[in-house]
């Protein structure tokens, strides 16, 4: 992976519109999340587990340009987040059985 | 100007001269030397504390220090050795110096950040040392700062922990720097699979530094908040849970030991081919096992907590994972052995110390596997067996690897050769003293001697006596070892570019290297460690 | 200048390398907060009722409003970068200004409700609550506090970036500094995305 140091513009830069759309989606998802929490505890937890990572993914993918990046950055982020998930899973091998 | 005579990095070449030129330099080689001197200074202090700790166990010296002082001594022995020598040892010293040379680059990716890493290191060290003489006095909790004692004790835990917190930044920034360097700055033609194995080790280590260190950082912040503001996450009196502390602490501190050992294994992997005059056996196995150790090693942390009250399921799961992590380490040992087999052995001091590493690390690793078995762990946890184990891996392993790397790369770094005879002479007391000191601990532990105890029952007298005498012999060896190098630094015979006949890139430039490392960045066309017997390499 | 043999370290600009380094730094931030998320999930499993009860004492309206504020600041941050990539310096400065303003709003509003109710670390009112609730608030102040520190740091970085854009040191050919600052700001937003439901909507 010895890429040239002077990097020509290798990937597209998104325009203004994409960001407005993503922002609107995020606001909608937040509203859904709030409404779910009004419904009840279980719905709130489901919202937490499903909608929140989705919101975060949208920010990573669009606002933080991951969509337009190459495999390396995507892999780097995936490895880190995957490690984190494994930490949680292993921790719960203890917590869940106390 | 005479052709080809470039100033070496040791000469003043920037706008600032002398010491100021050194402590403001962004040259990776100078920064490596700064780390070398600072880490060895802390090693010496930590070793001195160790000598005193051993002395206290001998009858005539039982009252040399109070019990409170003894607790502070073993705490600082641990803090100094772990946070100020072993963790920041190989990567910032030899990684900084050798990584760009080994991959054919002129510096690391972020030279200024590299200097700041060293500043963080020094700042953290000073804060930790300041905690010895301020507040309630030196911390007495052990280097692990276990709660709830660390929350309640009146000693200056807050500042000691803050020092460790600052040191974490040094480690994280080094990891970021090395990973980016390896991805972006390899010489033309140097594919990943043509890269030497020390950079592979540094790459795996860098990932641990990045992913694990922040968790320690936040854990220490929580301890500080709890002591200062009263936020009760760990304190049972406030609804907190000490087991949570242990989980968070060991999620970093176990992978930390792989930060310690993987670079040492990498250095040994550089040394063996040179002195066997043949290529490394199983290049891919060694490269990928470094990554595997880093990955699996991040998943075994709770083997420090088998007796702390976790669920049986967690105990079994972590025990299994602990057995698994031994496999990639063993793979390396087999590959090293195979490299030597039928090689044309050129016996030199770096080889001797590298072989010593393999031997002592194997003992340490095997005792680790023993501890990973749940039933055994119940018996040996918090005994001298554990102390013996980790000294075998951290000192016999990383320490010996550090010495081997120092002997190997000394002529390159300083342009001078030390006395090989002195290096051999030093080895005997080092090896004998080391084993007297730490093998005794393995025995003591099995007999039931608890760790971190100021005194002991008479049944343990013999073991302690052997260990203490061993510590004196070991230190004698260390003094000879370092005196040799100090003398050589100023008065050793001048060394040429390649005194050992190595084939990796660092030997293709002058000793000591010029500031820009290479006059022309080479283009790589071969695998690493390719020897050409027909042309004399 | 771009021949491999003659690059001098201080002259080389590696756009992707700088971005990679920034991402690696951001991962350390993710792991930093993860330690707290681990603590939260551990404690929530231990005190489910207390956490539920304590959460209901937080002002969800402020929490949600703050979320909208931060999401919008992420938008304006991204717009600022698009603007500079197109050479639209004035628009970029405007977007940066709005980003910073929204960040300030977020910080100014955050703990007001809790402090007015007498809930802060070390307060006698807090000490009188059941242990699980004390742990909840301990985590609340620690996590939002750490987040706040990062917002403030981000504001400082953005102020510097604004100055650099205004002076032309960041322009359509060299904008990696602004891009990296944007990455940092977005991460701060992501952290809040997780904090919102954990604390304000748990009830």
Image (tube, coloured by chain):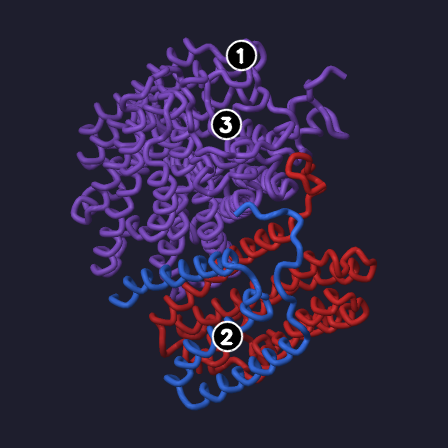
Chain colours: A blue, B purple, C red
Q: Position of residue B49 (x, y in %)?
A: 43, 28
**Frontmost residue, C8 versus B363:** C8
Where residue B260 appears, as percent x and y from the top left, is 41, 38
Are the numbered discs 1 and 3 placed on the same chain, yes or no?
A: yes
Residue displayed at 48% across by 84% down: A33
Instruction: Name the quadrant containing residue B59.
Output: top left
The numbered disc on residue B487 is: 1
In the image, residue A35 sits, relative to residue B9, either above or below, namely below
Label 3 SS: helix
Callout in the foreground (2, 1): 1
Tell which circle, 1 or 3, labels the residue nearer the N-terminal end: 3
Residue at (35% x, 21% y) in the render: B276
Image coordinates of residue B512 in percent, x first then y, are 59, 21
Any part of residue B296 in sight: yes
Give the secondary structure at mark 2.
helix
How crowded pointer 2 is (Cα within 10 Å; few <14, some 14-19, many 20+) is rated as few
| Residue B38 occupies quadrant | top right
Kind of element beneath mark 1 = helix
Q: Position of residue B321 (x, y in %)?
A: 26, 51
Asked if residue A61 lies left or right of residue B355, the reply is right
Badge 3 sits on which subunit? Answer: B
Position of residue C146 in the picture relative to residue B366 (left or right): right
Whether residue B236 is situated above or below residue B104 in the rendered picture: below
Q: Quadrant of the C terminus of chain B?
A: top left
Q: What label does residue C125 carry, if any?
A: 2
For label 3, the residue is: B40
Marks 3 and 2 in Cβ contact (< 8 Å) = no
Q: Is residue B447 left or right of residue B244?
A: left
Which chain contains the residue that carries disc 1? Answer: B
**Same-chain status of marks 2 and 1:** no
Q: For the residue carrying disc 1, how many other residues have a C-alpha within 10 Å: few (<14), some (14-19), or many (20+)? A: few
């Amino acid at each position: 992976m010895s890429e040239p140091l002077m990097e020509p513009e290798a990937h597209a830069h998104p325009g203004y519109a994409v960001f407005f759309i993503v922002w609107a989606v995020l606001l909608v998802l937040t509203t859904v999340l709030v409404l779910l929490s009004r419904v009840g505890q279980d719905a709130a937890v489901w919202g937490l587990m499903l909608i929140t990572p989705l919101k975060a993914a949208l920010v990573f993918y669009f606002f933080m340009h991951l969509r337009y990046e190459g495999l390396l950055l995507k892999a780097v982020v995936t490895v880190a987040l995957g490690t984190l998930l494994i930490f949680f899973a292993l921790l719960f091998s203890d917590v869940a059985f106390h | 100007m005479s052709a080809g005579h470039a100033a070496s990095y040791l000469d003043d070449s920037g706008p600032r001269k002398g010491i100021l030129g050194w402590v403001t330099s962004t040259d990776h080689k100078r920064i490596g030397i700064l780390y070398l001197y600072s880490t060895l200074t802390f090693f010496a202090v930590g070793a001195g504390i160790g000598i005193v700790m051993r002395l206290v166990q001998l009858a005539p010296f039982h009252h040399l220090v109070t019990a409170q002082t003894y607790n502070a001594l073993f705490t600082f022995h641990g803090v100094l050795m772990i946070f100020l020598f072993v963790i920041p040892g190989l990567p910032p010293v030899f990684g900084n110096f050798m990584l760009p040379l080994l991959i054919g680059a002129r510096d690391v990716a972020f030279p200024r950040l590299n200097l700041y890493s060293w500043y963080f290191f020094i700042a953290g060290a000073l804060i930790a040392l300041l905690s010895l003489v301020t507040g309630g006095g030196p911390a007495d909790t052990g280097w692990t700062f276990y709660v709830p004692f660390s929350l309640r004790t009146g000693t200056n835990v807050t500042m000691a922990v803050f020092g460790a917190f600052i040191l974490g930044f040094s480690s994280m920034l080094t990891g970021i720097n090395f990973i980016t360097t390896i991805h972006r700055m390899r010489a033309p033609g140097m594919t990943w699979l043509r890269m030497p194995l020390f950079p592979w080790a540094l790459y795996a280590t860098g990932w641990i530094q990045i992913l694990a260190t922040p968790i320690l950082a936040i854990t220490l912040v929580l301890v500080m908040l709890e002591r200062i503001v009263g936020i009760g996450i760990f304190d049972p009196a406030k609804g907190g849970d000490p087991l949570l502390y242990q989980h968070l602490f060991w999620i970093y501190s176990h992978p930390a030991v792989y930060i310690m050992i993987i670079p040492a294994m990498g250095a040994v992997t550089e040394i063996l081919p040179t002195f066997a005059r043949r290529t490394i056996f199983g290049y891919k196995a060694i490269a990928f096992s470094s990554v595997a150790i880093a990955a699996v090693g991040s998943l075994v942390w709770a083997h420090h907590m088998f007796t702390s009250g976790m669920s049986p399921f967690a105990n079994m799961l972590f025990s299994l994972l602990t057995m698994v992590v031994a496999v990639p380490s063993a793979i390396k040992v087999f590959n090293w052995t195979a490299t030597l087999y039928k090689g044309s052995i050129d016996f030199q001091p770096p080889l001797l110390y590298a072989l010593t590493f393999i031997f002592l690390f194997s003992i340490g690793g095997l005792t680790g596997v023993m501890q990973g078995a749940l039933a055994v762990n119940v018996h040996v946890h918090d005994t001298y067996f554990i102390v013996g184990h980790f000294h075998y891996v951290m000192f016999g392993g990383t320490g010996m690897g550090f010495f081997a790397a120092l002997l190997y790369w000394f002529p390159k770094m300083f342009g001078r050769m030390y006395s090989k005879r002195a290096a051999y002479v030093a080895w005997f007391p080092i090896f004998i003293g080391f084993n007297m000191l730490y093998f005794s601990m393995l025995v003591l532990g099995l007999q039931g001697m608890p760790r971190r105890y100021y005194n002991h029952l008479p049944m343990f007298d013999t073991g302690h006596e052997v260990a203490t005498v061993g510590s004196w012999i070991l230190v004698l060896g260390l003094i000879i070892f370092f005196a040799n190098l100090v003398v050589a630094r100023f008065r050793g015979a001048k060394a040429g570019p390649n005194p050992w006949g190595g084939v990796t890139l660092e030997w293709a430039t002058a000793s000591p290297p010029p500031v820009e490392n290479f006059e022309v960045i080479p283009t790589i066309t071969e695998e690493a460690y390719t020897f050409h017997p027909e042309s004399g390499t | 200048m771009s021949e491999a043999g003659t690059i001098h370290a201080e002259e080389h600009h590696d756009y992707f390398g700088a971005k990679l380094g920034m991402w690696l730094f951001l991962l350390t931030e993710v792991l930093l907060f993860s330690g707290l998320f681990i603590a939260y999930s551990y404690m929530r499993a231990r005190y489910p009722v207390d956490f539920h009860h304590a959460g209901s004492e937080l002002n969800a309206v402020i929490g949600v409003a703050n979320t909208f504020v931060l999401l919008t600041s992420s938008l304006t941050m991204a717009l600022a970068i698009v603007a500079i990539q197109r050479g639209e310096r004035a628009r970029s400065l405007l977007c940066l200004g709005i980003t910073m303003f929204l960040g300030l709003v977020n910080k100014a509003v955050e703990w007001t409700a809790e402090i007015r109710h007498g809930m802060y670390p070390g307060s006698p009112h807090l000490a009188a609550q059941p242990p699980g609730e004390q742990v909840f608030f301990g985590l609340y102040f620690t996590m939002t506090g750490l987040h706040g520190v990062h917002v403030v740091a981000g504001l400082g970085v953005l102020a510097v970036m604004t100055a650099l854009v205004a002076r032309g040191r960041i322009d359509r050919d060299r904008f990696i500094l602004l891009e990296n600052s944007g990455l940092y700001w977005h991460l701060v937003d992501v952290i809040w995305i997780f904090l919102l439901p954990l604390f304000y909507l748990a009830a």
